[in-house]
Image (cartoon, rainbow, N blue to C red):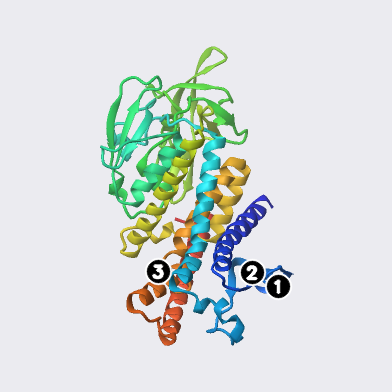
């Protein structure tokens, strides 16, 4: 229920803000607004405002609209002609169209600023042993490295506030086909060095578990057994919650990342391989033979013990002052918008996977996850979705605000509006493109939520 409620609240808020932008600028320009609707289809709630605008809530909540007085849609009385949208100056019509995406962008900046001011505790960007053969291992990352800053070109550096910030930067670089440079130290700030993470090698790949393994970044955690399933192979071998793993087959185990890798590789195809574990329990050192069970995960054969690994990660408080929070919010919104446009362009020319498109099912899932994580994560989710809505609505596609802005640009350059015949043809083409995008995004959602690869 929390997922459905979080999704509906997000949808209602973001649609209302978008349409409110159109409505307020239309009224400021002297245009009469006939209806302000959240949703489509059958009206389930209606109220008439002082200015005669009909405010409605409709049954299908996937969108909304502002219907204005317009001679192209219905006859207009002579005394109301100046209040019709089509009779307003071009600059005013363009401002009305642009106001919806602008309102979503402004909301995103406000929410990002609120998140920055309120602050949040996030895992420290302290890394464990990288996955064998991964980009992280090839870059020279080691267990205990703390990532301090990142750069796309090795010259302009951006501080890393925590592990989520680092993960976001890594995935952004991969999506845009760019490498990422890292400045790392140990946890006390000593031994600074700069490394090159070749995320551009994985350009065009969709984000999934396989991609994350190839990147190979793992958060640092102590090699502890957090829990042991009573029915699992670990319990059968005598392992218990609270055990600290010292070594496996004579190899020292400094962190949970390496421990996880050694367990997963403890098999020869179909048959598990027994390992010699050396553990510490209640101050005593014990040696145990441990044999995992081999299972199939995402098309890969891996060994599993039925245990939970690692201590809780060290966390840091990320919080900004008033002015710094506003500056951070503007910079974050601009970076995200630029990345979204670049990624869409790369998908259009086949340089990035279309599996990166997400639809309503994924958004609902993210809404539920962020709401369960707390108020601040939910605010950040709303900011990201609001900004995505602003950017997508500015795409130059008929039926979107960006398409209408293109009509106005044509009119401004030529001195005449786009003909009704051309508008009808472009509307049909735009509707087809949008339907194809929605179908693709929905199929990606189904595959993602079903765990297909």
Q: Which residue is mark 1?
A: 43
Contact between marks 2 and 1 (CB within 8 A): the answer is: yes
Name the residue rendered at 32%, 34% in the picture.
Answer: 182
Residue reaching furthest front? Answer: 79
Mark sitting earlier along the chain (1/3): 1
For label 2, the SS is strand
Local crowd size for mark 3, using a 10 Å CA cut-off: few (<14), some (14–19), many (≥20): some
Q: Is residue 332 visible?
A: yes
Q: CA distance from mark 1 to mark 3?
A: 30 Å
Query: Which is more N-terminal, label 3 or label 2?
Result: 2
Residue at the spot 58% in from the left edge and 41% down from the top edge? 376
Element on which disc 1 rests: strand
What element does badge 3 sit on? loop
Disc ID at residue 100 = none
Residue at image coords 37%, 36%: 131
| Residue 451 vertical position relative to residue 408 in the rendered view, above or below | above
- Of the 4 image quadrants, the one containing the C terminus is bottom left
**C-alpha separation, residue under disc 2 versus residue under disc 3:** 24 Å
- Name the residue carrying label 2: 37
Quadrant housing residue 142: top left
Question: Which residue is drawn at the image coordinates 51% and 44% (left, top)?
Answer: 112
Q: Give the residue at the far top of this rendering.
A: 283
Residue named by callout 3: 396
Compared to 348, does 88 lie above or below?
Answer: below
User: Would residue 289 be found to the left or right of residue 242 on screen?
Assistant: left
* Residue nearer the viewer, 436 or 78: 78
């Amino acid at each position: 229920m929390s997922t459905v409620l979080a999704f509906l609240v997000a949808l209602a808020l973001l649609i209302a803000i978008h349409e409110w932008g159109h409505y307020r600028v239309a009224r400021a320009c002297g245009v009469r607004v006939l209806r302000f609707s959240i949703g489509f289809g059958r009206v389930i709630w209606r109220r008439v405002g002082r200015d005669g605008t009909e405010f409605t809530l409709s049954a299908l909540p996937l969108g909304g609209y502002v219907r204005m007085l317009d001679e192209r849609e219905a006859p207009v009385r002579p005394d109301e002609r100046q209040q019709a949208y089509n009779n307003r100056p071009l600059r005013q019509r363009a401002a009305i169209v642009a106001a919806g995406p602008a309102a979503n962008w402004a909301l995103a900046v406000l929410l990002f600023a609120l998140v920055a001011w309120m602050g949040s505790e996030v895992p420290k960007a302290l890394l464990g042993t990288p996955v064998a053969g991964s980009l992280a291992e090839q870059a020279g990352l080691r267990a205990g490295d703390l990532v301090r800053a990142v750069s796309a070109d090795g010259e302009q550096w951006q501080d890393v506030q925590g592990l989520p910030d680092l993960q976001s930067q890594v995935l952004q670089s991969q999506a845009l086909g760019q490498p990422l440079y890292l400045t790392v130290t140990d946890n006390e700030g000593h031994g600074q060095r700069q490394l090159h993470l070749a995320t551009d090698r994985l350009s065009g790949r969709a984000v999934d578990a396989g991609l994350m393994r190839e990147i190979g970044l793992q958060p640092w955690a102590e090699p502890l057994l957090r829990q042991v399933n009573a029915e699992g192979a670990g319990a059968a071998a005598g392992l218990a919650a609270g055990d600290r793993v010292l070594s496996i087959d004579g190899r020292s185990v400094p962190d949970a990342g390496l421990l996880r890798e050694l367990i997963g590789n403890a098999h020869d195809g179909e048959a598990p391989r027994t390992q010699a574990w050396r553990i510490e329990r209640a101050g005593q050192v014990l040696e145990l033979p441990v044999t995992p069970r081999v299972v199939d995960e995402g098309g890969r054969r891996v060994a599993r013990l039925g245990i939970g690994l690692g201590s809780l990660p060290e966390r840091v408080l990320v919080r900004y002052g008033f002015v710094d929070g506003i500056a951070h919010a503007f910079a974050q919104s601009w970076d995200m918008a630029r990345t979204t446009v670049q990624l869409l362009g790369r998908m259009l020319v086949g340089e990035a996977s279309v599996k990166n498109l997400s639809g309503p099912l994924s958004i609902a899932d993210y809404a539920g996850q962020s709401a369960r994580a707390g108020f601040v994560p939910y605010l950040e989710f709303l900011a990201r979705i609001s900004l995505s809505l602003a950017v997508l609505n500015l795409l130059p596609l008929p039926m979107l605000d960006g398409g209408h802005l293109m009509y106005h640009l044509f009119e401004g350059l030529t001195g005449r509006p786009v003909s009704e015949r051309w508008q009808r043809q472009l509307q049909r083409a735009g509707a087809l493109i949008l339907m194809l995008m929605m179908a693709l995004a929905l199929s990606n959602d189904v595959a993602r939520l079903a765990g297909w690869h």
